[in-house]
Image: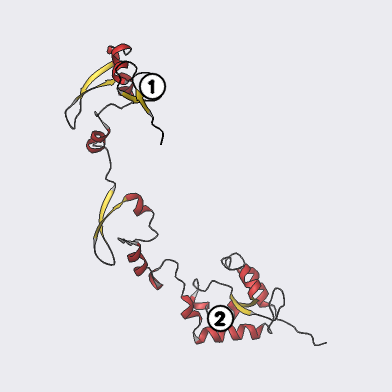
Amino acid sequence: MANNRKPCPVCGKAMHRQSLQCRTCYKEERAMPEHYIVKHCPVCGDEFTVHITHINRGQGKYCSVSCARSGSPTKPKTRVIFSCDVCNSVMEKHLSEIRKNVNTGNYCSPDCWYKYNQRDNHYLWNGGQHERLCPEGREWRKLVIERDRGFCRLCHSQENLEAHHIERFGSNKERRWDVDNGVTLCSYCHKKFRGKEDEYASMFDLIASVQVVVWNV
């Protein structure tokens, strides 16, 4: 990394590379004393000088950054003490971390978050595969495909057929196994509408309401 400090040409003290002389030499040679006010730091009590322009901007209350961070009466409390919902260990979290939470839980580590947010506790849980593959689900799939005469209702394919829920699987449990809430799609067409069920629900309702007619030639 390049060295950004160079000696002051007047006193030889290390200073910033862009400065023509150090701050002490500048005050002695060029600064106007009437523009500076002597103050005492409210934290450590040290005496320091502040330019009047800083005071006009509401600055110059403390002698250093460390004193400003420790002694500012207006600084809000930014960290809160919590106990982990899984292992009950005590932890400290920043307010910005709390605002990012997608639920009201508090966890000390990603492992505890993962242990707790499973199945019904996860905010995106909608039933899982064990509920989809139950006997009711298998019967519902069979009835939907039979009603549609074994054809994809979009491309009319008869291969790799799947039953698509018109209303999302987790949004309406009363209609979860309602045959009218399903429509037959091939796997290729089904992929196009995953995550877009609400957007195309009315279209699939109309398609499912029209009876499939197969002509024997």
Look at mark 2 in the image and give the residue it sits on. 178
Q: Is residue 132 above or below residue 196?
A: below
Q: Residues within 10 Å of mark 2 (few under 14, many from 20)?
A: few
Q: Is residue 58 left or right of residue 171?
A: left
**Residue at left offset 67%, top offset 74%:** 207
Q: Is residue 31 above or below residue 197?
A: above
Q: Is residue 127 left or right of residue 138?
A: left
Q: Is residue 172 left or right of residue 21?
A: right
Q: Quadrant of residue 153?
A: bottom right
Q: Is residue 43 left or right of residue 165?
A: left
Q: How is the image coloured?
A: secondary structure
Kind of residue indicated by mark 2: Asp
Look at mark 1 in the image and give the residue it sits on. 19
Q: Is residue 93 above or below residue 171?
A: above
Q: Quadrant of the N terminus?
A: top left
Q: CA distance from mark 1 to mark 2?
A: 78 Å
Q: Quadrant of the C terminus?
A: bottom right
- Which x, y percent locates residue 215? 79, 85
